[in-house]
Each structure stands twice: as C-alpha cells, then as structure tokens.
Amino acid sequence: MPELPTTYDPHEIEDRVYKLWEEKRFFHAEPDQAKKPYCIVIPPPNITGILHMGHALNNTIQDILIRFKRMSGLEALWMPGTDHAGIATQNVVEKNLMKKGTKKDALGREKFLEEVWKWRNDYGTTIINQLKKLGCSCDWERTRFTMDEGLSEAVKEVFVRLYEKGLIYRGNYIINWCPRCKTALSDEEAEHRDVDGMLYYINYPVKNSDKHVTVATTRPETMLGDVAICVNPKDKRYKHLKDAVVVWPIVNRELKVIFDKKVDIKFGTGALKVTPAHDPVDFELAREHKLEAINIMRDDATINLPGLDFDGMDRFEAREAVIEALKQRKLFVRSEPHRHAVGHCYRCHTMVEPRLSPQWFVRMKPLAGPALTAVKKGEIKFYPKRWTKVYLNWMENIRDWCISRQIWWGHRIPVYYCGKCSDPSKSIIVSKVKPEKCPSCGSTEITQDPDVLDTWFSSWLWPFSTLGWPQETKELNYFYPTATLVTAQEIIFFWVARMIMAGMEFRKAVPFKDVYIHGTVRDDTGTKMSKSLGNTIDPLEIIKDFGSDALRFSIISITAQGQDVYLSKQKFELGRNFANKLWNASRFVLMNLNGDMVKKDLCQTAKDPSLSLADRWILSRFYQALQEFTRALEKYRINDAANRIYDFLWHEYCDWYLELAKISINEPHTQMTLYKVLEKSLRVLHPIMPFITETIWQKLPREHDKESIMLAPWPHFQKAFVAKKIDCQMALLIDIIQSVRNCRSSWAIAPAKYVTIAVKVQKDDDRKTLETNASYIKRLARVGDMKVGTAIEKPAQSAVGVIRDIEFFVCLGGVIDIEKEKKRLLARIDEVTRCLSGIEQKLANQNFVQKAPQDVVESERKRKLDFEQEITGLRNNLTSLT
RNA sequence: GGGCACAUGGCUCAGUUGGUUAGAGCGCUGCCCUCACAUGGCAGAGGUCGAAGGUUCGAAUCCUUCUGUGCCCACCA
C-alpha cells in the first residue's frame, strides 16, 4: 500500500490538490438533461474585498452544499463572480490617486474610469484567489463581473423595461445624501446609529407682537432654510397663532404658521420649524401646504448663502455659529442632551444629510406583490424560518428605491437628454443605445445622464444575468431557478428581497428555492468583526497556521444553524486536531492494509458470517452516521452534520474500532472493514474537509474508476447493515471495558499490568457474547485471565463492578482496602438509588402508566429492572465485604 | 415605539416534534511518551438548564410575566 507522510502538512497537500482539481476541470458544470440541476450563485464579493471570516463561513457552507450535491449525482453549478461595488471601489481608487498627488476631478471622467479599470484588473481578483485557497469548487470558467458586457446589457434591458412600464421615474425628493461621497444613497444604505446630540430651544418672535413661539430642534443650522412654523391644530397652546406670522430675525424673512396633525404635541414645545429642503417630514408638509423649499447647502454640506456670515461654513460649524447669533439676539432659550438615531453612510460612515435633489427611483410596490406571494406560498423557504417574517414585514412596507448615484464608477444610466427640445417631457430619451438624434426634434445635441446606477441595481439581477439573460441561453433554461442562496442577515433587504422581486418580474419565477441565512461572525467578546475595529481574525493566517480543512471544519462545527459565531484563534485547533487525528488513523490503516486482500472482495453483505462483532458494529454505526449526516445537511443543520461525522470517526472508528481491529489486523474481514469504513467516511467528510480527504483517498484502492473523491458517488445508505442487536452487544462490551478500566484507575493498578477478572452473568446470551469476544476485553482493559459463567464465586481480594445483572470481579492481588471498596460501592448504590426512586415514583403514578405512550412506559420498566439488578449486585457484594 | 434572538458545568456552546442518569470542545485533576496520533490515550471532578408562575402523567424544551444581554426595523423634529 502507498503510504502517507508521517506528519500532516496541510500546505503541501492543499495547493497540490487544488491545482489538480482545477486542471482537470472538475468544477465545471454543463446543462445535462440526464441529470438534475443544482445551482448556487455566489454572493459576489466586492472587488475591493479581501477574504474575511464572514466570507470564509459563507463560502464554506456553499462549497459543502455544492460538493455534497455533486457527489449525490446532480449537475452542480456554483456560479462565481465579483461585484464592481460602485462607491467602495471609487473611494479606494480616489485614495490611491491622492497618494499619487492627484484627484479624480483633475483627471476627468474618462481618465478616472481608466484608472478604476486598471485597478480592478490588478487587484479585482484577489478575493477569487483567496476563495481558491479556501477550497471553493466554483466553476471559474463561468466567472462573471457585474460590470462585464453581458451584465451591463441586462442592466440596461431592465432599466428600459421598467421605465416603459412606468416603474422607473425621475423626481425631486428628499434623499439620503453623503456629503463625503457626494452622492445620493438609498434608504438601506443609510445606517441608523444612535448619536448623543442636543435639543435646542429657540424663540421665534411673532410679528407685530411682543410674544414669541419657542421651537425645539436638533439642527439649528437648518433654520437658515426655514419657511414656516408648524403646530398641531389640536394644540390649545397655539390657538392664538392662527393667521400669525413669525419673523426669522437673522435673515429677516417672514414665516407662515401652519397647522398639521403630523406634529406631535408632546415632543419639545409642540412647535416645529419647517425646513423642506433638509428634512423629509418638513418636505411632506411643504408639499401639502404649498410652501417653497430653500436649499441652503452645497453638495459637501457647507452652507450656501452668499452674503451671509454662515456662507461656506461646514454644517456643524454653522450650527455653533447659528446658536451664537441667536444668543446675541437673546432668542436662544436653552439646550438639553438628546439621544437620537441619525443616518450614516454605509460606506464611509459620514453623517447622512437629507437633501432635496432630482433622482431616479424605482416604484417598488408593484414589484413587491409577486415577491410577497412567492414566499407566502412557500415557493421560497427561509432557513431558519424566522427570517420569513422579517422579509414579509419589510416587503409589506416597502418604499421606492433611489437608484441614481452621483459617482462615476458604475452602470451609466441609459437616459439621454435632448438639448434642443423645449418640452421637458420630450427631452428625455430612455434607450439602451445612444440615439443618433432626438426623435422629437431631430437635434443631435444629445447628452447622457451623468449619473450611474446603484450597485445593487446590477446585483439584483445576478441569479439570471450570470446565466446569460436577456438571452435565453441553455444555461438559463437549465439552471434557473437556482436551488439555494446562502447569505448573511445584513443583506436580506439589500439583495435577497430585491433578487426575488427581479426574478418574479423578469423570469416570472423565483430566483432560488431555499435561502439559508447564517449568522454574523463576531470576536470572542461578541463584537462584530470589522477591519476598522481591528478585531478580525484573518482566514489566510488561519489557513497558514492550521490549514484550510481545519479552518473549514472548525468554523462549521461551532456555528449552529443561523446563530452568530464567536471566534478566537484558539477555536481553530478543533479542526486542526481532527485533521491530524484523521491523518494518523488513515496512516495506520494504510500501513496495515494488504492491497491484494482488499481488492479480492470489495463487496460485503451485512450477514457475512466472517465478519466479527466489531466489524458488524462499526458498519452498523457508519450507516447510522451516514444517514444522520445526510439528513442534517438537507435541513441545513451543517454543524450537526460536521459533528456527527467527527464523533463517528474519532470516538467510534478510532477509539474503538481501530483498537479492536489490531487484534485481527491481518484477517480478511478486518482488512475489508477497515478499508471500507474509512473509504466511505472520507467521502462523507469530503464536502467539509475536501483537501485531506482527497489526499488520503488517492492512496486507497478504488471501488470506482473515478479520478477524484469529489467525483465519487455519495455513499448509499444500506439499511441491512444497521443492526441494533449488534449495537447492544458491543455496548455491553464497551460498558464492561470502561468499568474495568475505572476499577483499575481507582485502585491505581499500573497501566502495563495485566489483571485477572471473573464475570458472573445471568443470561446465556451475555455469556456467549463475552466468551466469543473475550479478546476485546482482554486487549482493551488489559486483562490476562478472564472467567465467564453463571455460577462464578467472588474471588478473594477482588474489587467488584456491576452492570445491570452482570457482576465482574477484578483480582487485586494485594490486600484490598475494605473501607475504600465499601465507600466506592456505597457511592454507586446512592447514585443508583436516586435514579431508581425517580422511576418508581413515575411508575407508581397511575396517570403516567395510563397516559404516557406504551413504549415510554416500557422503557421505564426496563430501566427500573436494570437499576434493581445493579443495586442487588452491589448490595450483595457490600455485605460480603463485612 | 415595534420586531427578533440569546441566557444550560470555570469558558464557548449543542440539545430537532416535551419522555433514558442534560451532552461536546476548551480548561481543570490523576495516570500513561502502550509499536497511527502527546495536535495523543485512559480514568475522573464539575450543572437544582436566568427568575417566578402556568399547561402536562412528565418541562432545559410549550405558554405568560419579569430580569439581563445583543441585534434589526421605525421621519418624533
């Protein structure tokens, strides 16, 4: 047999194995009518991204599913790609330019975009290479990019179609504006954070009166754009203000007083200053009351009021200045601390400025309808289920989507304006290609809208645009709808919900059937891992220190379905140790396997009489583990699956079977079973730990002519091998072995020393089991001589152990410490008595006996009997001691 | 203001439809470098499952309330 290197070196094997897979094109999928399709589209990482633990978790899960389905005989396509990440990428490239001493405005649009493309060609595939390190079996030949030609085509097609359907419109509304990125953001891109601010109370004098109205505001600087004061019509305090006019002293502007029930009587003074260009509520009020909106800020949030002292000030600077001016005029009343939620740019974390500006929007309500129905009807299922509600709730309250961005990097809005047409309704031309001339007036003075689209406007098409849409490709028809989407909770609204809407609108079918939402990766104090906090663990460093398989296994094993995961570097030892254990166990098997013997008979039947108890037991246990593993994966309980195969391999195969196999290592049945269980276990483990399983598997004889374990079929569950009776017999032997070891340990018998034991059994079946398998006990409990019988007398100078109705005696040789042995027995009697009395109470309860299911009652009776027998055994021995 | 999640041995967490003596990993104690593995083996200590009620023959598990922690959503200026 070929041998494995003595030490497990993940780096050497992982790079080599991955290269082989890629060269042989094992990740490639093609539409194949003979097979069922299975497709996952990757959540495209940003080209600016570098692999973090969130990616590692997300992509490991996807790779596990893909490898599992591929082995299960489906045509499995994992569609990879990257996202151009408009704002994020533009920011990165701008920073680079700054280092070079230049600016994007100095370069101009075209030159700047050249720089971005250059950057993306140099660095945009970093994360792809990192995913390869992780072992991802994506079909790299199909890698897409949200800015590549095909996807741009899809974006334009969608824009035009939605516009023609009346679902895209342009309008002047209050949007979230990032004064640093100088662009509009969608509502989702404004992250609300609690900020400790102040609430300022300010007096507005009433015209022709010595009275004033006190208004409370968090943003005094916006006063410069005030157009009215608003109070609730039901507010008795302000009845007198009907028809009154208040004066804004700094600019000497007169403000109307309006009445609207939107104003909360209980907040502040109940009087609200109305600044339509800088607050969404005020904007609404202005529309309803036909008030003018005065924009007082430039795009960088500096004050734009030429002639006034405040002109050119930053908004926060202006705030102080306005307060100072008010104080001078004795109009400032007081201020108090006020904590409130304020929007921040999700890219640069600058405080968002509500800004009135012309933007493009998607009307969402009509798109939401079918997307709601699809989920309600169960065509799409969320795992864990609770996200369904979050989704439905958001979808039911959906608001229009602002899709225009005032940046350069992205899909240019396919809208053109005629410079000659005087009628504004005719001057807009929405078209996939630039029109030669204006269809209305024939002018060639045509300019394209300078804005680009929200990055998510390309992402929401991902499940079908990557498959070739708007072309009806064979890939699209075969792989769409895709099977499973694996993603994080942060992205449900940004991406998942919108993909469902796009799928329903443009394909009339759901984009995927299952959505698996995994948790957030946190550090071991529970804080979300983020680069800015510096609390990240670099997956590449973990791969370097422990190997990719160790990383994958560890993170999967400790992540319960949908729960957040708390990581520390130390936790990755779990996977490393397991990999090492598997390596060494396999090394042992390979060292002892005789290739000819294994090849002779690759098939075994469950009833093969040459199989030993241990053989039949490990086969029985394997098939149970296989079944549970498969079921867990299908329910997306991936950690359960990982832990099931871990327990089987470590605690059943290694701890017990390998030790027992040493007894008959050269026998054909042992050879066969050693090989068979290891080979199949490797296949089961392969989706989670692809590299190590491949490496070991390559050294084993094959049952199939497959070149790689990743192409080997998923082990077939064979019920015939599952034998509860065998499990029980083995459990008895394990109990006895552990009990004897316990005895040895408490009597401090030297580990190397062989002891003599005698076992007194009641049942003939048990006698047979023990006699037939005496070698197991002898080897694993270091027993020299062992007597078994129904009429065994307790040997002198012996310690006792009781298992149900079986008593065994360990000859101690020297003088036994009677007091110590008494204590030991009494302690156990105590424990068992406690359990027993609980059961007796239960059984004495008529309600229990009548109402509980029969099998539960039966098993309680059985337990009662077992405990009674043990107690009897223990008591007998206790009396014989005195 | 709504909604969701979590509270189980020293630490980090499993525990699926309520039913064996509540499990694991790390840590801890004792013994062992036994010819696959000290990234290991064997044996062991350690928990009245956040609190109080309720449903039930039976609750870590279901219901209610409370306490603490975290997250998401929301235009109270």
Image (spheres, grey):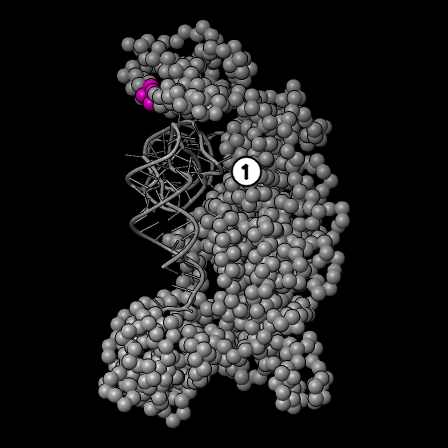
Kindly indicate the quadrant of the structure image that contains residue A372: bottom right
Q: Secondary structure at mark 1?
A: helix
In percent of width and height, residue A333 lies at 24, 79
Kindly indicate the quadrant of the structure image that contains residue A636: top right
In percent of width and height, residue A148 lies at 66, 69
Tell me: A245 left or right of B15.
left
The single residue placed furthest to the bottom in the displayed view is A307
Tell me: A113 left or right of A739.
right
Towards the viewer: A343 or A149: A343
Q: Is residue A374 above or below residue B9?
A: below
Kindly indicate the quadrant of the structure image that contains residue B30: top left
Mark 1 burial class by Cα count in 10 Å: few <14, some 14-19, many 20+: many
Residue beneath the point at 44% across and 61% down? A530
For label 1, the residue is: A645
- Image quarter hosting the C terminus of chain A: top left
Residue beneath the point at 51% across and 41% down? A640
Residue beneath the point at 42% across and 87% down? A304
Q: Main secondary structure of the magenta part?
A: helix
Q: Is residue A850 above or below residue A248?
A: above
Q: Is residue A459 magenta?
A: no
Residue beneath the point at 51% across and 14% down? A766
Looking at the rendering, the stretch of residues picked out in magenta corresponds to: A829-834
**Type of amino acid at the residue the image marks with label 1:** Ile
- Asked if one can make out residue A708 in the rendered structure from this viewpoint, the answer is no
Towards the viewer: B51 or A246: A246
